Image: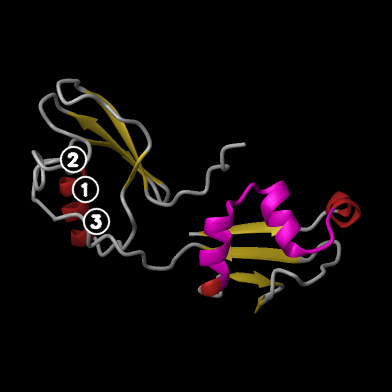
């Protein structure tokens, strides 16, 4: 999972470094930026770079999200998942009534997140489980699971 961004003339006029583009133009959170920098997942024209570096028009900024994340805090539990859609970034599941979204004291190993953890393990995906919406226990609806959170931070 990669994001490619070609530096535009307007970027050169508005921003002084790569960090500024990632924060202001692409709306990356500080937390995500710190993680990407630590894991050396940001490159400019094919070389890992320091986000404080300057850039030129038509430079290619690449952000690689293919790094493993720890999801060991969720117990994997085999369950039938009604997967409606899946791509690199998103998993959409039809959540049945009577299933909790998150593990809790009462649902330590039988929540939807436990089933998704089992599924992620079975396909070798080491990503955190990030439910986008929270549905009540007795509600049956579509539930979105974000495989990699890159949506803008709240302002």
Q: Residue at x 16, y 48 (%)?
A: 114
Circle 3 sits on which residue?
Answer: 120
Depth check: give the residue in front, 55 or 136.
136
Q: Secondary structure at mark 3?
A: helix
SS for tag 1? helix
Is there CB contact under 8 Å for labels 1 and 2?
yes
Q: Residue at x 74, y 70 (%)?
A: 52
Segment colored magenta = 15-37
* Mark 3 Cα-neighbour bin, 10 Å: few <14, some 14–19, many ≥20: some
Residue position marked by numbered label 2 in the rendering: 112
Do the residues bearing badges 3 and 1 touch, measured as CB atoms within 8 Å? yes
Residue 98, image quadrant:
top left
The quarter holding residue 126 reads bottom left
Q: Position of residue 104 (x, y in %)?
A: 16, 42
How many labels, in total?
Answer: 3
Q: Which mark is residue 126?
A: none
Q: Does 35 appear in magenta? A: yes
Most frequent secondary structure within the magenta stretch:
helix
Residue 32 position in % (x across, y down): 53, 58
The quadrant the C terminus occupies is top right
Measured as percent of width and height from the top left, residue 83 is found at 24, 38
Label 2 to label 3, Cα distance in Å? 12 Å
Q: CA distance from mark 3 to mark 1?
A: 6 Å
61 vs 149: above or below: below
The Cα–Cα distance between marks 1 and 2, rounded to whole angstroms, is: 6 Å
Residue 78 vs 47, above or below: the answer is: above
Q: Which residue is the site of mark 1?
A: 116
């Amino acid at each position: 999972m990669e994001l490619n961004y070609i530096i535009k003339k307007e970027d050169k006029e508005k921003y002084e470094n790569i960090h500024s583009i990632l924060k202001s133009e692409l709306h990356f959170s500080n937390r995500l930026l710190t993680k990407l920098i630590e894991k050396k997942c940001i490159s400019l024209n094919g070389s890992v770079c320091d986000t404080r570096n300057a850039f030129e028009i038509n430079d290619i900024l690449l952000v690689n999200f293919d790094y493993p994340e720890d999801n060991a805090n969720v117990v994997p539990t085999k369950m039938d998942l009604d997967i409606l859609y899946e791509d690199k970034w998103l998993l959409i599941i039809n959540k049945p009534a009577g299933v909790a979204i998150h593990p809790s004291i009462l649902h330590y190993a039988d929540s939807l997140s436990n089933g998704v953890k089992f599924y992620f393990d079975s396909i070798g995906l080491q990503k955190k489980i990030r439910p986008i919406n929270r549905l009540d226990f007795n509600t049956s609806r579509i539930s979105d699971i974000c495989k990699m959170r890159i949506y803008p931070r709240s302002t």
